[in-house]
Amino acid sequence: MGGGQSHHREPDWGAIRAQQEAEARARARAAAEAARQEAERAAQAARAEVERLMREAEQARRRFEAEQAEAARRAQAAREEAERQRREREQAEQAARAAREAAEARAREERQRAERLAREAEEERRRQQAAEEAARQAAVAAQQERERQQRAREEENRRLQAEREAAERAAQRAAEEARQAQAAREEAERQLRDGTRPVVVPTPEEYSAFRAKIQHTGGFFHVAVSGIAGSGKSSLVNAFRGKHNMDLDAAAVGVNETTLVVARYPDPNPSSRFVWYDVPGAGTLKVPDWKYFNDQGLFVFDCIIVVVNNRFTATDVAILSNARRFGIPAFIVRSKADQHIRNLMKDIGYNSDDEGGNKASYFARARDQYVAETIRSIRTNLQEANLPDQPVYLVSNVSLQTTVVGKAPKKILDEVKLLTDLAGTAHRSA
């Protein structure tokens, strides 16, 4: 703790190395830029040469029309000259490409060298930092030992006082717990009489059990697709995975609800962090809507997609309310958009047997009506359920599947936005 302290200040080696690395990167970029400009100049000269040759060929053709014999000879000479120029142009392009590749190789070498120097500098900085930290901790430990001895004396005095106070608080706490238990019992009886749905908080054991049940894995994003029976959950899961309903590893679909337990479907893309889950539809289980969320273990998922029809059910409201209470991102999705739009087209007069009908016009009108009605209905449903406003994603399973596999769908609604927002949510949760 005593003794003189040196005021000599060591050079900032980290700053010096950072400056050297910055200068190295700047030189590499300058060299690459010079090589690129040289390649561009060579390519431009080759293009100019081609244009000149094309003009000469045109002049030769015109002279051929005036003087056949002389023109034939000159045309042959022009073709030979053009061939020679073509070979020269190819050679120039090859030389430019070789120069560009050499410049890129040099740039890579410089970048790798700079990265290596940066790693070595970082390791040296950490070693110095560790040594300084060890010295600091030794000094702190000595001070802490003195303080500990002082605290031990003070703590003994406080312990005696705390024991007396703890006895008094224990008596008060016992009386308060008895009062709270009585109040909780009376409140539960009142809720049962009034028909109020209680809030059920999962226990730590339930959290662990459900995480094990769905094979919750670190580093992955677990998405539950839920909703009422027949809303198209299984088809939506298949579309998210880029699968058709008839593929061998697709989720089972049918007229009746086919999902009776939570089914796990890893994403077939090996680089994807998503794991998809098909949750049994509400209405297929003899469970009250307010218990559906906990009974299906939805509280352990990283994200919940609620597949809805035009109006919310009590289960939809319960899922959204509980997701908000547990802090789980929830997306409202209405699938089968193509089917609903086709039905609206028929309602407004479209006849598929009429070859002269303006199908595109009918589709645009039906789509706009479907979007407006759905957004208005969902907003009203959220207000009636005392839930905050949030977007609804209108998707066609066909367009979604096409987009997932990297193709461009013929018609599109919110498929790309849904995939983008899901990816953003997954990235923020990482």
Image (cartoon, rainbow, N blue to C red):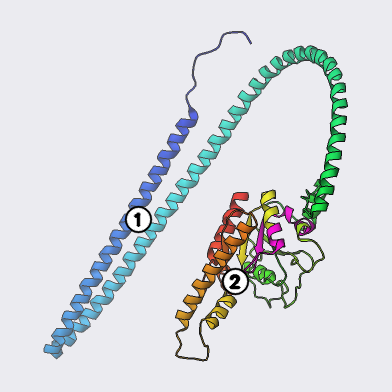
Give x and y (percent) for residue 268: 66, 66
The front one of 132 and 213 is: 213
> Considering only order in the chain, which callout, 1 or 2, is on the residue closer to the N terminus?
1
Q: Which residue is tagged 2?
A: 401
Badge 2 marks a residue whose secondary structure is: helix
Q: Which mark is residue 148?
A: none
Residue furthest to the left in view is 66
Residue type of the residue flagged with mark 1: Arg
The front one of 68 and 155 is: 155
Label 2, label 1: how many angstroms apart (C-alpha)? 42 Å
Residue type of the residue flagged with mark 2: Gln
Q: From which residue to which does the magenta span run?
A: 291-318
Q: Which residue is tagged 1?
A: 36
Badge 1 marks a residue whose secondary structure is: helix
Q: Is 45 situated above or below 217?
A: below
The front one of 283 and 416 is: 283
